Amino acid sequence: MTRLLHLIVALPLVAGHTAFAAPCQFESQGDGRVAAIVDARGVRLDDGREVRLAGIEPTATTRQALTSLLTGRDVTLRGTDDTPDRYGRQGALIFVGESEAPIQAMLLAQGDALVSAEIADKDCAAALMAAETEARRQKKGNWADPSAIKNAESPDDILAGIGRFMVVEGKVLSVRQAGAMTYLNFGRNWTRGFAVTISKRTQPALENAGITLKSLENRRIRVRGWVEGNSGPRIDVRLAGQVELLGANEPTGVRP
């Protein structure tokens, strides 16, 4: 775990973020011992509490990785809000023993999870994204699959994953507003092509992150979220972290 901490501290420097000694060190929400892995996003502690792993979305290997990393381990829960969700689960970042890096970062660094973009704290969000980026660069775990990142120019491939959390890359061909909704269109056929939808209430968060919607026209971006739609696939952006700007010369992560 010490090696992971060094990785997660150093990577934000490469990504252009300010370094920090211990990311994701939120207020403690208690501790306990992991008695069982409930599913790919949840664990049960020996006192009966069910904990939902915040900050990540699972892949096919997440549950197996959690079983290896957490079963029977003493953990500390950290987060900004310990209010249970509607299923009675407490959302938290999980730390094993005295580690200063959350288990979520290890899953991401191994390619065994995806960043969900739900963490609002900029330093913690940057650290988690840095871990995922390094795993993607090294083609670890999930990223060994050449189809792990979907091509926005292949809407049928994206539509086949409706109801799933996906990462999509492509060039925004047009930005159109209809009422309170803005559409980022990646295809000429607006009905069948892939599009990103952004409500007016989400725009301030994007602008605070340095992203103005009109500036995205003709830009390559990476977007993550749940795929919706009927004739054409859609991802609804509600959090600034769902959108990443890609440099003109940055290697693409999609299949040619």
Image (cartoon, grey):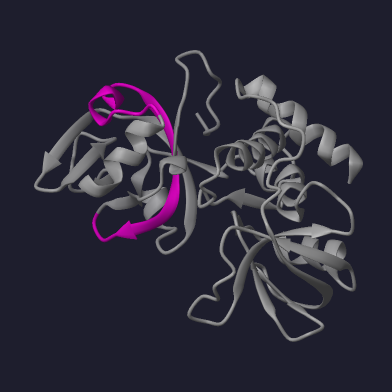
Residue 183 location in percent, x, y? 22, 41
Q: Is residue 251 magenta?
A: no
- Horizontal side of residue 200 vs 132, given as left or right: left
Q: Is residue 218 magenta?
A: yes
Residue 160, quarter of the rendered image = bottom left
Residue 143 location in percent, x, y? 66, 42
Q: Is residue 42 above or below residue 127?
A: below
Residue 42, quarter of the rendered image = bottom right
| Relative depth, front residue between 234 and 28 | 28
Q: Residue at 59% of width from left, 77% of height from top?
A: 89
- Horizontal side of residue 38 vs 82, given as left or right: right
Q: Residue furthest bottom?
A: 48
| Count of marks placed on residues | 0
Residue 25 location in percent, x, y? 71, 48
| Relative depth, front residue between 207 and 39 | 207
- Horizontal side of residue 177 vs 12, given as left or right: left
Q: Residue furthest left?
A: 179
Q: Which residues are magenta?
A: 210-231
